[in-house]
Image (spheres, grey):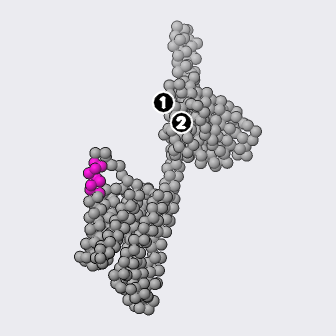
Amino acid sequence: MQMIVDWIFTFLDMISLTFCSAYLVFLLPRMKESAGNKKILRVVKGMAWMIYTLLAVMIPMIWRNDSITMLGLTMYYILIGFMLYHRDKVGILYQVGFMFSLYATQVISIFTAVMVREVYALENRTSAYIMILLKACLLVMVTFVFRVLVRKRYMSVQPRFQIRGMLLVPVISMILIFGFAISSDVFLMRFGYGWLIVYCALILVMNLYCFYFWYDVSKTQELKHKLELMRQQSELTHQFYADLESNYAKSRKVIHDIRNHLQMLEQSQKFAESQSYVADMHQMLNALGMTYYTDNRMLNIILNDKLKHLNQEQFQCSLMGVRLDFLSEMDTTTIFANLLDNALEERRESENFRLQLQGEQIQDFCVIKMSNTTKGTYTPGKSSKTGHEGIGLENVRNAVGKYHGEMQTDQKGDVFSVTLLFPDDN
């Protein structure tokens, strides 16, 4: 009977270890699996976890050294996760953190069981049972904490952000606990096991907090990287339109000279029979010139560039008299280039595409409204088309916010619209 009880507790110990270890890996974002290899992969995964359980039993029996046991299990555990599940550096970080937590809970359980045995004069076998139960309970609690961290605060690392420093936290903590445990004879004689348990528990809590805090650091790094991309995009777009304006200026000079020559040719009797040819030349030069849609210089350049591929039936623009001089050239480029790019994406999907851009002064607000036909369905916060809720509109929101303005999006039927409101105090 005693042997059966021993086997039950040993089985509980191994099952709790394997289940919690596997559960954490299941929580991590997984790599895609091909449909044909799913059955084979399931068999491989099952065998891998069986070997993991056997290693947890065999390594301590062969070497009887905690450092070798934890190093061997940790390396094999990382190998299982990386090869069969996630292929993610952050996943490795969470696995290393979990293995440290496993070691910390084991140390806490052992010293707690020893302390209980000394206080209540229990048998070694009973003390071992207490240790196994306590370790299983603590491991389940730690796994639940990791579950919360993975589901709510899991962060994919950006290319510029390294996690090597974060990996050192659980590794060094494991070394500290191991070193303190093997060199604490005098400490134990003087203070007992209580303070050692508190020491291990505090290091465990510190590691869990580091994982919690690391998410904020990663998120900040991601936002910095995203803002840098947004800044570069705005600068490149502005430079493009600055170069375009320069080219328009040069073209106007050439067109002016050519018109003078054509006028001379028109007045010449030698070319009287070529009036239709000269008229065609004038029409071609008109196409090379710039259409004036608005009094804002930079916005006019943007509109000429974006609307050049649309015929007159496809767009309507009424911005004359609307004062937009309070917008910087950079922000003008960011706002209208992105909005027009998003709208013109729909032109590829719709043969009956229409674009309308209008502005007016309404009481104390300057209102700009851009509407375009669409085949998609707009949902606030989501995108039915690439670019509708991507970095483009995020740039627009940031630029509009500089002037205490607001951006509103709406869809009625097959018409998607964006409305910009700027207060007059700009």
Query: For mark 1, what is the residue?
Result: 349
Q: Is residue 244 at least partly visible in the picture?
A: no
Magenta region, main secondary structure: helix
Left or right: 363 in relation to 239 = right
Q: Is residue 161 at least partly visible in the picture?
A: yes
Point 43% across, 78% down: residue: 200
Does residue 176 sit above or below 21 in this rendering? below
Quarter location, residue 82: bottom left
Give the alpha-carbon distance from disc 2 to disc 1, as whole Å.
13 Å
Left or right: 28 in relation to 259 = left
Q: Residues within 10 Å of mark 2 (few under 14, many from 20)?
A: some
Mark positioned earlier in the residue sequence (2 or 1): 1
Q: Nearer the viewer, residue 196 or 349?
A: 196
* Residue 399, image x, y percentages: 60, 46
What's the mark number on residue 222?
Answer: none
Q: Nearer the viewer, residue 169 or 201?
A: 201
User: Does 419 lie within the magenta span?
Assistant: no
Q: Nearer the viewer, mark 2 or mark 1?
A: 2
Query: For mark 2, what is the residue?
Result: 377
- The residue type indicated by label 2 comes to Thr
Q: Nearer the viewer, residue 1 or 389?
A: 1
Left or right: 47 in relation to 341 = left
Point 39% across, 78% down: residue: 130
- The residue type indicated by label 1 comes to Glu
The magenta span reads 37-45
